[in-house]
């Protein structure tokens, strides 16, 4: 709590947390909050295990059975796919999307 004879301020504490983050295995004590009911989440997870990219008809059926809207179902699948990607896959996606924008030395413009 003390550094160089004085108490740590907010900035000092922030810098220490950034420099020495807690391991991911340590629970921060906050309760997990879910937007959807457990029954709805289970139905979505079950469908996700069978097919990560459901058709619009499957989404309509899921929306009807869970009581959610089509948008909520679509967003849940989109978010879940994003969470399932590893950090390595995410960085590869960023690199590959950056590579599509190439400068043309002769024209001085961008190539599509």
Image (spheres, rainbow, N blue to C red):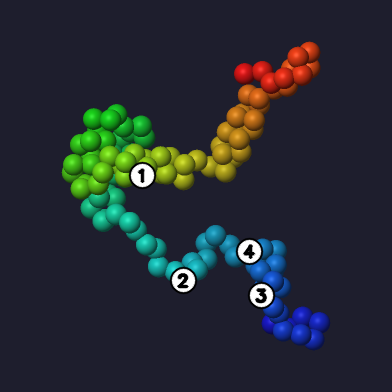
Dots 2 and 3: beta carbons under 8 Å? no
Q: Which residue is drawn at 81% across and 82% down?
A: 4
Determine which residue is flagged by label 3. Answer: 10
Q: What element carries label 1?
A: helix
From the top left corner, tell me how far across and down residue 43 is, in percent.
Answer: 25, 45
Q: Which of marks 4 and 2 is nearer the N terminus?
A: 4
| Residue 9 in view of the camera | yes
Dots 4 and 1: beta carbons under 8 Å? no
Query: On the picture, is 87 further left or further right than 13?
Result: left
Determine which residue is flagged by label 2. Answer: 29
Q: Earlier in the sequence, mark 1 or mark 2?
A: 2
- Which residue ends up furthest to the right in the rendered image? 4
Foreground mark, 3 or 1, reads: 3
Q: Which residue is drawn at 25% across and 33% down?
A: 58
Foreground of the two, 16 or 100: 100
Q: Earlier in the sequence, mark 4 or mark 1?
A: 4
| Residue 84 in view of the camera | no
Query: On the picture, is 62 further left or further right than 18?
Result: left
Q: Earlier in the sequence, mark 3 or mark 1?
A: 3
Q: What element carries label 4?
A: loop
Q: What element carries label 2?
A: loop
From the top left corner, tell me how far across and down residue 26 is, in percent.
Answer: 52, 66
From the top left corner, tell me how far across and down residue 106 is, in percent.
Answer: 78, 13
Q: Which residue is drawn at 23% across and 42% down?
A: 63
Determine which residue is flagged by label 1. Answer: 76
Report how far apart the C-alphas of labels 2 and 3 lie in the structure: 21 Å
Label of residue 21 in the image:
4
Foreground mark, 1 or 2, reads: 1
- Which residue ends up furthest to the left in the rendered image? 65
Q: Which of marks 2 and 3 is nearer the N terminus?
A: 3
């Amino acid at each position: 709590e003390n550094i160089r004879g004085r108490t740590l301020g907010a900035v000092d504490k922030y810098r220490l947390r950034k420099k020495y983050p807690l391991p991911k295995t340590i629970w921060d004590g906050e309760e997990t909050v879910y937007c959807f009911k457990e029954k709805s989440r289970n139905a979505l997870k079950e469908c996700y295990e069978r097919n990560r990219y459901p058709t619009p008809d499957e989404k309509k059926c899921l929306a009807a059975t869970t009581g959610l809207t089509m948008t909520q179902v679509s967003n849940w699948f989109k978010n879940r796919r994003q969470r399932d990607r590893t950090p390595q896959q995410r960085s590869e996606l960023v690199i590959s999307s950056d590579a599509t924008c190439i400068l043309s030395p002769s024209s001085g413009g961008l190539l599509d």
